[in-house]
Amino acid sequence: MTGVARYAAEYGLPGRVHAWPVPAGIARGRVAAVDASAALALPGVLAVLTPDDAPRLAVPEDATLAVLQGPQVPHRGWCVALAVADTLETARAAARAVRVTYTTEPHHAELDPAHPDAYEPQEANAGFPGRVEHGDPEAAFAAAEVRVDATYRVPPLHNHPMEPHASTAHWDGDRLTVYTSSQGGTTVREVLAQLFELPEDRVTVVTEHVGGGFGSKGTPRPDVVLAAMAARRTGRPVTLAYPRRYLPTTVGHRAPTVQRLRLGASADGRLTAVLHEATTHTSRVKEFVEQAAVPSRVMYATPALLSSHRVVPLDVPTPSWMRAPGEAPGMYALESAVDELAHALGMDPVELRVRNEPEREPDGGKPFSSRHLVECLREGARRFGWDGRDPRPGVRREGPLLIGTGVAAATYPAAAVPATATARALPDGTCVVRINATDIGTGARTVLAQIAADALGVPLDRVRTEIGHSDLPSAWLAGGSTGTASWGWAVHEACTELASRLAAHTGPLPADGIETHADTAGQADADSPYARHAFGAHFAEAAVDTVTGETRVRRLIGIFAAGRILNARTARSQFTGGMIMGLGMALTEHSTLDSAFGDFTEADLASYHVPAHADVPAVEADWIDEDDPHLNPMGSKGIGEIGIVGTAAAIGNAVHHATGIRFRELPLTPDRIL
Ligand code: MOS
C-alpha cells in the first residue's frame, strides 16, 4: 500500500472548494422557498444553489439527473439545494443552515400489487420483454401431478460501495474536466456534454481509480452534475462527495420484489409448468423494472412457461442496477421454489435440477454456446460432500443448533459490447495499450495487460495499460459483467494486428513506435445464433440457533462454468465477493421503505448490515474448465455478477433443511426465524 492511487474526491486542485447537498424533507410536493441567508452568512460559504437560480441544463435522458431544475419534489431525499464552501465542514454546516419550505402533496410508497397504477411493462431492465409465454402455463400447472405455489419477497437492497459517489469538477472557460467515481467515463462524458450543451471534446472525464460501484455508478449520478454546476457558479474547482446517508435516495437501489412461483411437475420430477410472476416498484421520476422473472427463461426445460413482470410507480427514490439485477432476486425465488418442489417430490434437489436440463434455451429455442450447469452441480456436490445427505429436514442437531445443507443454481448472461483500443510498440521493447476502460476494483488493468501480452507473445512486464481517461479510445462501462469481454476483445484485436505488423517490420522501430487501432463495432454486438450464459452451483451449510434465532453460514462452495478464466486470482476474488454479497442478501442486508415517510429507514452502514469478517465463513469458489468458441476471442464469460446469483437461495434452502420451516422473505434475521 503506497497511498498513491487518487480517488475522485482527492484531486486537491488549486482553489478547490467543497459542496454538500440538501435533501428534500418531504415525500412529495414542491419547494415553496429556499432561504439561504443564514447559510450564506457563514464565513467561507461561496454559494447556495437552489431550484430558482441553479444553472439550467438541457433536459436529460435520465430524469434523475435533472437536479435543481424546478420546484418539484418527486421523493424524499431529492436534492433541493447545494451549499458550496471553502471547507467540507463549512459546506456541511451551510447545508444544514439552509431553510426550505414546501407545499406537500399526498404520497404513496407501499408496494401493493393491487395498486391502481400498477401495469405490465413492455420491457424490463436490459431490454428484456416484460412478458414471455409458451404453451398453456395455467392449464399445465392445474393439471400437474405435483405442484408448488409460493410467493417470495426480497426487500430493497443498497449497493453501498466503499467509496461513495464523488466528483471533482473544474471549468477552464468552456472546457469541463471532472474526476469522478464511475463505472464508465465514456457515458459520463456523453451525458455531461449533452446536459451542458458542449461538444464532447470539451469534456474530459477521469475515472482513474474507483472504489466499487456494484451498478450504482453504471451511469452518471447527481454528484457529477451538481459538482459541475457548482464549479460553473463559483468559478472554482468543486468536490462533491456524497454523504453515505444520502446514497440510498440518490444513486439507485435494488427494487423490492414480490415473486410468485408456480412449478408443476410429473411424479418422476419432470417440470410441466413454470410460472414466474414478479411485482416490483419504480419511481415517478423514471421507469426501472427489476427483471426478476427473466432467469426462468433460461434455466429449465418445460413445455409451458410464463415469465412476467408488473411494476408499481410510487413516490419513492428511483431504483437502478445492483449486482446481477434480475438474476439475483429472481434466482432466489426460482431456486427456492425448485427446492420446495424437490421436497414435495421426495427427490434430491441436485438430481431434480439435472433431470430438467434443457436441450436448448427454453425461451428463445437457441442452442447454448456452452452450458455446464450439470458439471457445476456434480463437482460442487463432490467437493461439498453432498452424497449421503439425510434429506429429512430438522434432524441434524448440535446442542441448541440445527444444521442443514442446501444447493442452488446460478446463471448470468454472457455478453460483449463494442469498444475501441490502441496498441503501440515502442523502440524500447515495451508496448502501451490504451482504452477508456474502468477498474472498479476488479483488476481490469491486470487482465487487459495479460490479454495484450498473450496476443503479442511478450512477457507481461513489457505491457503498460492506460485506462480511466476520456482522452483514451472510447469503451463501454464496467457493467453487466461485460467489461473484460468487451475491452479485452478490442485489446486483443489491436495487439493481434500489432503482432503481425511487428512480424513484418524489419529494422529498428521509428522513434514514436508503431501503433494499431481496433474497433469491435459490428463484431462484439453481432447477433449470435447461440444462447450465451454463464452457469454455476452453490452449496451451503447453515447452523440455526434455536435459542437466539441466529443463522450462521458455516461453509459456502460455488462452482462456476464461465468460459475461459483469464486470471485465477482476480476471478476468484470476483466470485467470492459476489458470494459474500449473496450471503449478506440471505442473512443481514435489508432496507425498509417506510411508507409513511417515503424513505428508507436503514441509510447507513450501522443499520444496513453488510457481512463483516466474522459473518463470512470459509468461502470456496472454483470453476470447471470451459472452452466456449462462440463468445469473444478470449473465450471468456463475465464473472462480476454470477457469484451473487443463487447464493441466497442455497442458504435459504439450507435453513429449511436445518429447521423444516420454509421462510420466503429475505433476509433470514433472528426475528423472522424465532
Ligand atoms: Mo452491474 S449491476 O451491471 O454494474
Image (tube, rainbow, N blue to C red):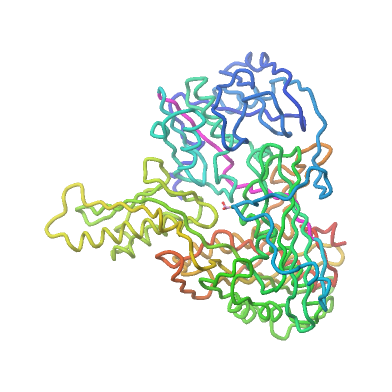
The spot of residue 89 in percent (x, y) is 61, 27
Residue located 53% across and 26% down the image: 229
| Quadrant that contains the C terminus | bottom right
Which residue: 83% across, 31% down? 106
Name the foreground residue: 672 vs 200.
Answer: 200
Q: Is residue 296 left or right of residue 228?
A: right
As drawn, which residue projects farthest toward the left? 507
Q: Looking at the picture, how far across and down is residue 258, in whole percent?
A: 78, 55
Closest to the observer: 531 or 344?
531
Q: Residue 153 colored magenta?
A: yes
Residue 244 picture location, percent across and down? 65, 40
Q: Provide the residue span drawn in magenta.
A: 152-172
Measuring 85% from the left and 57% from the top, which residue is drawn there?
Answer: 671
- Rendered position, 292 above or below 203: below
222 in magenta: no
Residue 604 rendering spot, x and y as whole percentages = 70, 43
Q: Front-most of 184 and 163?
A: 184
Residue 130 versus residue 182 in the image, above or below: below
Q: Is residue 1 visible?
A: yes
Tell me if 109 is positioned left or right of 506 in this view: right
**Residue sticking out furthest to the bottom:** 388
- The reply to whether residue 397 is in sight is no
Is 263 left or right of 387, judged from the image as shown?
Answer: right
